[in-house]
Amino acid sequence: MVIGKGMWLFKALVLSFIVGLFPVQESIAQGQSLKVGVFKVRQEPLNTGREYVGHVEAMAQVEVRAKVQGYIEEIKFKEGSFVTEGQVLYVLEQAPFKAEVEVCEARLEQAKAELFRATKYLQRLKEVKEGGVSQFEMEKATADELKAKADVKLREAELKNAMLNLGYTQVRSPISGKIGQSLFKKGALVGPSTGPLAKVVSFDPVRILFSPSERDIPKITAFGEDPSFSVLLEQPQEKALQIPVRLDFIDNQVDPNTGTISVWLKANNPKGVLVPGQYVKVRWVQDTSRQALVVPQASVLQDQKGRYLLVVENGQVKEKRVRLGQMLKDMWVVEEGVEVGDMVILEGLQKVRPGQNVEVMEVNL
């Protein structure tokens, strides 16, 4: 019995010691302040526009072709260089065409001589007294003159064609732009049936095609009427380029499958920074003078009552209900509920509750 009483007394003392620990621990917890990372509410320019993926298109892409057959004697351009309209790109063998021009010139001289003879003969017949020349002779002389005139015209046309062919031995660029690879080398036999010699792509100006939603059409059609409305073109993974653009035209129908419509912008591109075939970002920015309050997306909480933030005021956590607007990248625009400088808890949200004392550490974003 003594042993039993001793064990009971020992258990009672241990239980009393354990129970006594709870107030001590609670008081320690109440005396400590948890550290949280906070973001100070700030203002940023409000972008009411949208962002689209755009595709750069050349205004013209033209194949360079030979109009006459001949061997390439010279290639007068550097592959990948910019060329101008009318610039000589290839020179074909010219000797056969020069010879043809000389032949046509000689034939023309012969035809002119025959016309001179026929005209003079007819004039002499007309000077003969009536009855001295038969009707048959007069008709034949008149026909010979007409035939000689027609032959002169024919020889003039042949000479003109021969000179054109000689000119075609200098293959010129049909447009200004950037020329690609030469598909034939010096000495190759080329002609109308051998296919393109090279391709020239126009670079200035260029078009940018993008496909906004049909809901954006009213804004698009007002483009240019609002001076605060501009377009930014961004190259993927590169520093953003702000390039002046203008609306070129809007397609005449909406794609029923996607609910989008094709829109083309036009941009001057004198330095060739925009390359046909390249993908860019098209961003519309409207009314950038308007400022909006923003908070990080990760700081916004939500329950059955709606969205709210946990903020720190005088070292204590408080709950603030907010009305949110649009997204700006990874930030929410706050229409109502906070002010500039409010400290919104961003790090440690799951460890705190309203009314709790905390220490703050500012997080810069």
Image: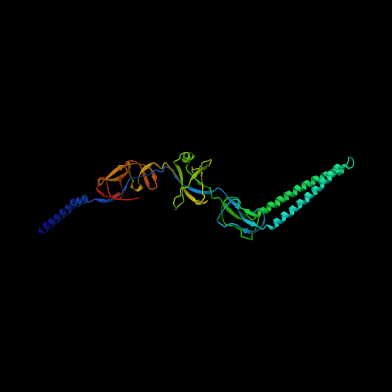
Q: Quadrant of residue 74?
A: bottom right
Q: Nearer the viewer, residue 48 or 244?
A: 244
Residue under the image location 73 percent in, 49 percent down = 156
Figure quadrant of the N terminus? bottom left
Query: Can I make out residue 65 in this image?
Result: no
Give how far across and how far down residue 186 sits, in percent: 62, 60
Q: Quadrant of residue 318?
A: top left
Residue lying furthest left in this view? 2
Residue under the image location 70 percent in, 57 percent down = 96
Horizontal arrangement in the rendering, residue 79 relative to residue 288 (left or right): right
Give how far across and how far down residue 333 sits, in percent: 37, 43
Give how far across and how far down residue 159 sits, in percent: 72, 51
Give how far across and how far down residue 44 sits, in percent: 37, 45
Q: Nearer the viewer, residue 253 or 121?
A: 121
Q: How many marks are shown on the rendered structure?
A: 0
Q: Nearer the viewer, residue 129 or 140?
A: 129
Q: Quadrant of residue 70?
A: bottom right
Residue under the image location 48 percent in, 49 percent down = 280
Horizontal arrangement in the rendering, residue 271 relative to residue 304 (left or right): right
Horizontal arrangement in the rendering, residue 208 relative to residue 48 (left or right): right
Residue lying furthest right in this view? 131
Query: Can I make out residue 63 in this image?
Result: yes
